[in-house]
Amino acid sequence: MRYDYDVVVIGGGPAGQQVAYALADKKRVLIVENDLWGGTCPNRGCDPKKMLYGVVEAKRQTSLYQTKGLARTAELTVDWPAMIDFKDSYTSKIPGATEGGLRQANIHHNRGTAKLLSNHAIDLEGEELSADKIIIATGAKAAVPNIPGAEFIEISDDFLNEKVFPEKIAIIGAGYVAIELANIAVTAGVEVHVFQRDHEILKAFPAEYTKQVADNLIQKGVHFHWNAHVTRVEKTANELEVSTDDETVAGFKHVYAATGRPANVAALDLSAAGVEMAETGGVKVNEYLQTTVENIYAIGDVAASPAPKLTPVAGIEGRYVAKLISGEISEPIHYPTIAQLVFAGPELGQVGVSLDVAKKNPAEYEIKVYDLSGWYTYNRIQDVSAQTSVVVNHDSGMIVGATVLATNAEELLNYFAEMIANGHTSEDLNKWVPVYPSVASDLQYLYE
Ligand SMILES: Cc1cc2nc3c(=O)[nH]c(=O)nc-3n(C[C@H](O)[C@H](O)[C@H](O)COP(=O)(O)OP(=O)(O)OC[C@H]3O[C@@H](n4cnc5c(N)ncnc54)[C@H](O)[C@@H]3O)c2cc1C
Ligand SMILES: NC(=O)c1ccc[n+]([C@@H]2O[C@H](COP(=O)([O-])OP(=O)(O)OC[C@H]3O[C@@H](n4cnc5c(N)ncnc54)[C@H](O)[C@@H]3O)[C@@H](O)[C@H]2O)c1
């Protein structure tokens, strides 16, 4: 049977693009996108978020040097509209540049919403196209609680595009998105209220560290409403009111939902091809990222794979499926060490064996806690609360996990990720001469 394409990729985000580029020279590939080429990460996720984070972090880090040689004659303030313009100067180029890249690589690409018609056919805006293999890479979409007033609730996409200083906002949820947006807003001078249904934030991270993140945000001025089940949002004149079981808080300019990002499958009509969803959410996949239909794969945020939903993971899954399809490999996917980090000023990140796992297996692991404020770099930048907990394997003596809460924690965490992934020991550290003084040269303190 001759199909129109060897491979049709649905979704032009980080996951879908990796497959398309990796197979461009080997297969007849079509990639389709119904919104912004580039997907969530560069248009309305990681990259624009970090543009705003950079601005507010500059403000916070400047304040660390107060009384240490940096005198402030006027208050440093965030100019919200200028900050959003700065972000737009980056994001506005993304869809065009992404499409240009596909064109240059001679990858067939079409705009439109794809819908499955069978296991070998899709409908693209009324046109039927057939393919030997179909890759579902449609990402995830923010969930909005189904409560009275849901029509007034916005999501992170809206926050990142808000041109007017928002004065007072409510955020429902306390996961990654909520904490990162709350930090940006409060540092920019916005009154921020976070409504969380229990008394925990950032559940993927160890509680002793997330408590510190919450305390830092409270110190910056965030109002946490714990055990708060938001029951309705009402509009009064130009303001919004948020009601929970216990209270009503008024005066909000915006109410944002940050209550998770379920798989984006609404338009796909998965059942037409026999593709099933996993009970936990996401498109059900096996260890080859195959869905319940042999020739249809799911990758990135849309897939119910066991890895965290992050851009580098979308890339790994995309490259894996491309190699599988081109016959370069035949083994199940193997995920390397994956570092995760919340940009919360200071940042909280973890990699490798978690503290929870280490605590449950004391015969195997030892946890070493380091007060980083004594390390040269953290003393120099005056981050007096910087800390890391390192998990060491008793038998090998090697570092197998780390949690870091510090300014620019991503740097230290990336070194830990490298050490863990490659099984580096203290002797290996002595084999290179990093720039002195720097975070890398500070690593010697781990073995003193
Ligand atoms: C606010 C925010 C901040 C984030 N920060 C980080 C971070 O700092 N670090 C990190 O690693 N990750 C971060 N993430 C997560 C990261 O953005 C995702 O993990 C990543 O974008 C997943 O890539 P993907 O290709 O699977 O999905 P997406 O990037 O969502 O791409 C899927 C694409 O498919 C398209 N599509 C959907 N349905 C159809 C259809 N039927 N037909 C055609 N096209 C369709 C969509 O329009 C979209 O462009 C963040 C996410 C958010 C929301
Ligand atoms: N720095 C990063 O790498 C980064 C940043 C942002 C997002 N992301 C990715 O995006 C994913 C989605 O982020 P997220 O913050 O939307 O989800 P999340 O799963 O991290 O957090 C969801 C939060 O919403 C709460 N919640 C869920 N349903 C609720 C309801 N009905 N009412 C009240 N609260 C409710 C949960 O208790 C939790 O606090 C993350 O898991 C991560 O993979 C990564």
Image (cartoon, rainbow, N blue to C red):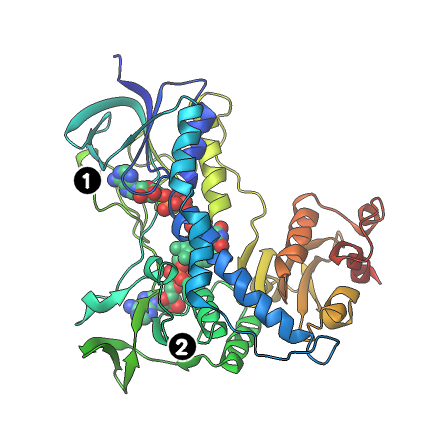
Would you name the residue on which mark 2 appears? 192
Numbered label tally: 2
Q: Residue farthest to the bottom?
A: 247
For disc 2, the neighbor class at 10 Å (few under 14, some 14 to 19, many from 20) is many
| Ligand 1 within 8 Å of the CB at mark 1 | no
Give the image location of residue 323, x and y in percent: 48, 26
Q: Residue farthest to the top?
A: 1
Relative side of 120 to 290, left or right: left
Would you name the residue on which mark 1 appears? 269
Identify the residue at image location x=37%, y=44%.
39
Q: Contact (CB < 8 A) between labels 2 and 1?
A: no
Give the image location of residue 125, x and y in percent: 17, 33
157 relative to 187, above or below:
above
Closer to us: 304 or 209: 209
Q: Secondary structure at mark 2?
A: strand
**Location of residue 108 (image quadrant):** top left
Relative side of 321 to 419, left or right: left
Q: Nearer the viewer, mark 2 or mark 1?
A: 2
Identify the residue at image location x=44%, y=24%.
104
Relative side of 151 to 433, left or right: left
Give the image location of residue 193, x and y in percent: 38, 78
Give the image location of residue 161, x and y in percent: 36, 58
Q: Secondary structure at mark 1?
A: loop
Identify the residue at image location x=57%, y=66%.
57
For disc 1, the neighbor class at 10 Å (few under 14, some 14 to 19, many from 20) is some
